[in-house]
Amino acid sequence: MDCNTFSTCLGGAGGAECGYRHLYTPCPPPETDGARVIDAGIEVLPAPIGEINANRALRVSWKYVNDYGGVPERDDVRFNVAMGRQAITASAGAPGAGYPTMEDARGAGYTPVRQGISVSPKARLIQNISYAGHARWTEPAPSRSPRLFELYLPAVCGQRYLVRVLPKRFCFDQSNIVYGSIDHLLYADVPCG
């Protein structure tokens, strides 16, 4: 390879003559690699003592094993949780509509309130949820078992809470985030009295 061709290849402008090989494998969306969200649920709990703006709390939880590539230390999947609310209707059956959309869970149209929490006219968004017990900026303990993810949110009586849980993978080359495409929808009614 002559100097000009070599220089072109180093600059990324070359073609087949450079013999490129990708340094990173393509970034697969979560839940296309065999891993799945399991045991997802929502429960209504009493409000914590001293909570002024809520008379109940919601515990949203699920489990997920991030075993892409068979690497038990892998820690490149986080979750966004988008939550909307509406008044409980007289029919009180399972909701057919009203859930935050996939775009809502990706953060489209939100205004940041504080780190990781954003609001829109339709919903609240909590971003980048890691597994329970994982301290920020620490290496995860290796695991081949599903990890527990949980989130506690304030709730007000007389409201129905509609939740979308969305996994996302931070790509290996730091170029992008890839979102899952499977619906994980939960709801809870918080009755008064």
Image (cartoon, rainbow, N blue to C red):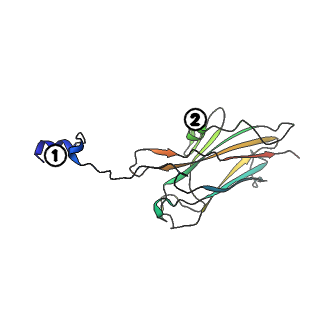
> Which element type, helix, strand or loop, lies under badge 2?
loop
Residue appearing at x 86%, y 38% in the figure: 91
Residue 60, position in %: x, y?
69, 52
Residue appearing at x 56%, y 38% in the figure: 107
Query: What residue would you read off at disc 1?
Result: 6
Spatial CA span between label 2 and label 1: 46 Å
Residue 159, position in %: x, y?
79, 40
> Which element type, helix, strand or loop, lies under badge 1?
helix
* Label 2 close to label 1 by CB (< 8 Å): no
Note whether 38 is above or below 163 in the view shown.
below
Q: Nearer the viewer, residue 91 or 125?
A: 91
Whether residue 58 sits left or right of residue 112 in the image: it is right
Query: What residue would you read off at disc 2?
Result: 110
Kind of residue indicated by mark 1: Phe
Residue appearing at x 75%, y 38% in the figure: 96
Whether residue 146 sits left or right of residue 153 in the image: it is left
Kind of residue indicated by mark 2: Tyr
Residue 140 — which label?
Answer: none
